[in-house]
Amino acid sequence: MKESERIKKEMLEDDSDNDYRSASYLNKIKRAERKESFVEYVLPLLKMKYPVNERENDFEIITEKYGRIIFYPKANSLLFSKDNNWMKHFGLNWIKKWLL
């Protein structure tokens, strides 16, 4: 069972009328789906071109041009270790445009 499916099931079983809790569940589902789609579709393509180290919450991509890049799929953010520069909220689009 995928993490997003587990969270959806948990949300359906929760019988509280709290809107903040519902919004929290929806945010968790969106983040889990973002990571799952990255792992299913983009990660295999990246592994063909670059060495990729999978860790618990992030993926380390080692390139010659940009150096070591750490991608956080749930937050959709990149960290360029060479410059200690963050790119937030459009990391996956950057990976698709510049690395694939």
Image (tube, rainbow, N blue to C red):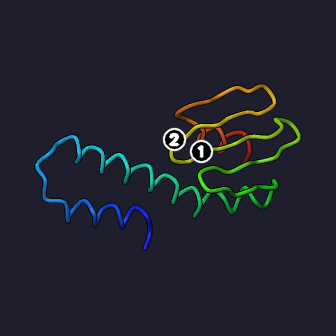
Using residue 47 as the reference point, say whether residue 9 is left or right of it. left
Where residue 28 appears, x then y in whole percent?
38, 50
| Number of marks in the rendered image | 2
SS category of the residue bearing label 2: loop
Where residue 31 appears, x then y in whole percent?
44, 49
Using residue 63 as the reference point, say whether residue 88 is left or right of it. left
Q: How crowded is the residue under tag 1: few (<14 C-alpha within 10 Å), some, or many (20+)? A: some
In the image, farthest residue toward the left: 17
Where residue 99 appears, x then y in whole percent?
74, 44
SS category of the residue bearing label 1: strand
Using residue 74 as the reference point, say whether residue 92 is left or right of it. right
Q: Residue at x 37, y 54 (%)?
A: 29
Is there CB contact under 8 Å for labels 2 and 1? yes
Where residue 50 appears, x then y in whole percent?
81, 53
The part of the image, by quadrant, that contains residue 43 is bottom right
Q: Residue at x 69, y 58 (%)?
A: 54
In the rendered image, which quarter contains the N terminus?
bottom left
Give the number of the disc on residue 19.
none
Q: Amino acid at mark 1?
A: Tyr
Please name whichever residue, 44 or 54, is drawn nearer the observer in this view of the structure.
54
Q: CA distance from mark 2 to mark 1?
A: 6 Å
The part of the image, by quadrant, that contains residue 91 is top right
The part of the image, by quadrant, that contains residue 64 is top right
Q: Residue at x 30, y 45 (%)?
A: 24
Note whether 11 is above or below 85 in the view shown: below
Q: Which residue is mark 1?
A: 72
Using residue 13 as the reference point, say whether residue 5 is left or right of it. right
Q: Which residue is mark 2?
A: 75
Q: Amino acid at mark 2?
A: Ala
